[in-house]
Amino acid sequence: IVTGGGGGMGQAAARRFARAGARVFVFGRTLASLEEVCVGETNIIPVVCDVADRSSVANAMAEVSKMGTPFVLVHTAGTNTPDRFMAHADPSKIASGETWERVLDINIMCVVNMMNAVAPLMAAAGGGRIVVVSSTAGHGYDSFAGVPYTASKWAVHGLLFTARQQLNAQGIVVSEYAPGESNTPIVDKRPVLPTAEHRQAMIRCEECGEALFFIAS
């Protein structure tokens, strides 16, 4: 299962697993967002799912379970917003309460929802792999990330660090992938967009896909 599979890092990861012969279920909020990743790929199956909604996750997992037990979860879904400061000369750049709720809900609770959904199935089958995309912003200071995003990624790091031993006891390996600047669609939400030269220096989505495949293997 690859969440956030409609584009960017998730799309690259889904295609990398499919090329290796895996049956890949890509989760995304709309079918239209998943159509591109499925083009020319017979091993990729689109599943409409809002991973922030537990009932939507349950319905999606019911579809997946019809074809077997997932061995790997690659969770790439996440978000950021242009209003990401605690203090700024431009009031529009100060994170609103709604922004805080949205970023924390998507970046933290979506991880919880998916881990809760797959872990019991993996444990019953003898084990599995969970790989969650975090960020270097969850390990130190990142001037580009903003406060809500940084807070959410520190929370994800703590979540995985604490849950790891508990799930290891059930045969589930939990890994965190925390890349530096990556040229994914989330970059387009920065208050100041990077130059083309800056983007070229970033990690490419295809490189992220390779890293996620390596970690899961």
Image (tube, rainbow, N blue to C red):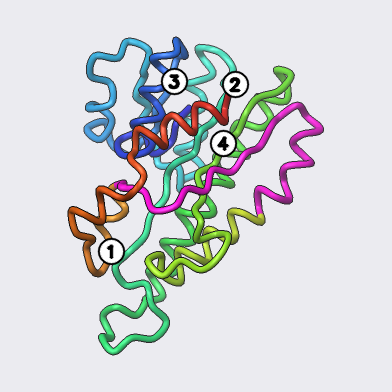
Q: In this view, which residue lies farthest toward the left? A: 196
Q: Earlier in the sequence, mark 2 or mark 4?
A: 2
Q: Amino acid at mark 1?
A: Arg
Q: Earlier in the sequence, mark 3 or mark 4?
A: 3
Q: Earlier in the sequence, mark 1 or mark 3?
A: 3
**In this picture, which residue range is highlighted in magenta?**
159-184
* Residue at image mark 1: 190
Q: Are marks 1 and 4 in contact (CB under 8 Å)?
A: no
Question: How many C-alpha atoms fall within 10 Å of the one at disc 4: few (<14), some, or many (≥20)?
Answer: many
Q: Are marks 3 and 4 in contact (CB under 8 Å)?
A: no
Q: Quadrant of residue 195?
A: bottom left
Residue 15 or 182: which is nearer the viewer?
182
- Residue 8: percent from left, percent from top: 31, 39
Q: Are marks 3 and 2 in contact (CB under 8 Å)?
A: no
Residue shown at the point (49%, 36%) measured from the top left: 57
* Residue at image mark 3: 17
Residue 205 or 126: which is nearer the viewer?
205
**Residue 24 magenta-highlighted:** no
- Residue 54: percent from left, percent from top: 51, 43
Cα distance between the residues tagged 2 and 1: 35 Å
* Residue at image mark 4: 131
